[in-house]
Amino acid sequence: MTDQALDSMVSTNRPGPAIVRNSDGEVSVTLPDIHPGYGDEHYIEHRRWIAALALYARPGDPPSHVAYSDGDRQVWQLVTAKLRDLHRSYATAAYLESLSALQLPSHRPPQLRDVSDTIEKETGFRMTAVAGSIQARTFYESLADRSFRATQYIRHHSRPEFSPEPDMIHEVVGHGPHLVNERWTQLYQLAGDAVRRLQDPRAVDLVSRVFWFGVECGLVNEGGEVKAWGASLMSSVKELTQFRNANIRPLSVADMAAQDYNSHAQQQVLFVAESQAHLEDFLGEFFTTVQDDSPYAVEA
């Protein structure tokens, strides 16, 4: 069995967790010193066990059952309770409707398999487990096959209001409502189709930037207010309480292409659509038409 390492899919120079399976089949998790869980051996061992479940799963297997710890359950209860209150004030109406369709439990983390089953019944999309963040092309090409690669661990208890990496709360509370909505899964699939046809890494990076600012951090004007729709915003207490303080700009592929982003930190620049339909049309047109020689891809 060869070494297997997972690389970050985000555009950032800051190191992320290193998850490795060595030639003997042993799995290790190493957290950088900037990670909230750095030095917490119990948390790291728990992460290692969850990572191993994903790494040893056979292709096509549903997500394995995870025995969440008391700490995981406490973080889930705390974060989702705060998010429920914030969603009422800051989330778009369409997001709230889709979130309710998932019927997520409030007292414990759900099993990813159960969430995936609910989504698949509604839209045909499914969630498959990964040990950690993966390369951009792998992530997007899975979307082309209507499969969303999701993590199963819970963020560290010392920093529950913001996670520097995609955790179970991000996947389920952030992306879950998108994936249970047929219109929005079409956008995810179009993003995957785009990367599958692209050869130039600069064009793939452009797709990642537009996906980040549109799907992960997208904002919508609704009833005269700026509301949040993006998955990263919807799963972060810190982001939801402060996103209106960001430099908010109109949707623009050119501006997105020129704007660096860092998933490890709170966003300083965000983009807002005139309406939910405007956001969907903007993303759909871009993902459908982007090519290797698109000007912003060539210049990126």
Image: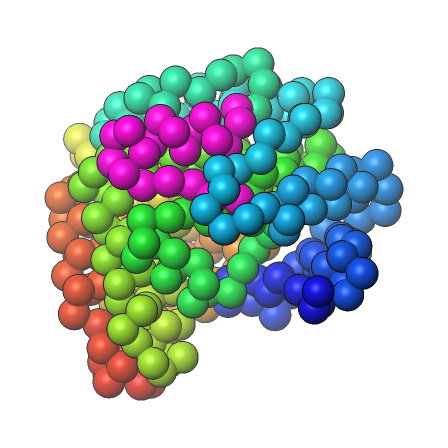
Magenta stretch contains residue 203: no
Q: How is the image coloured?
A: rainbow
Image spot of residue 100 (x, y percent): 33, 20
Residue most toward the top?
107
Observer-nearest of 244 and 69: 69
Magenta stretch contains residue 118: yes
Does the image show residue 41?
yes
Principal secondary structure, stretch drawn in magenta: helix
Question: At x 34% / y 81%, what residue is drawn?
Answer: 199
Observer-nearest of 71 and 266: 71
Image spot of residue 51 (x, y percent): 67, 46
Placement of the N terminus among the 4 image quadrants = bottom right
Q: Is residue 299 above or below residue 45?
A: below
- Give the image quarter of residue 133: bottom right
Observer-nearest of 158 and 172: 172
Does the image show residue 89?
no
Question: At x 37% / y 72%, what residue is drawn?
Answer: 204
- Give the image quarter of residue 102: top left
Question: At x 24% / y 85%, what residue is drawn?
Answer: 293
Q: Which residues are magenta?
A: 110-129
Question: At x 41% / y 47%, what residue is drawn?
Answer: 148
Q: Is residue 246 left or right of residue 73?
A: left
Image spot of residue 103 (x, y percent): 39, 18
Placement of the C terminus among the 4 image quadrants = bottom left
Image spot of residue 107 (x, y percent): 57, 14
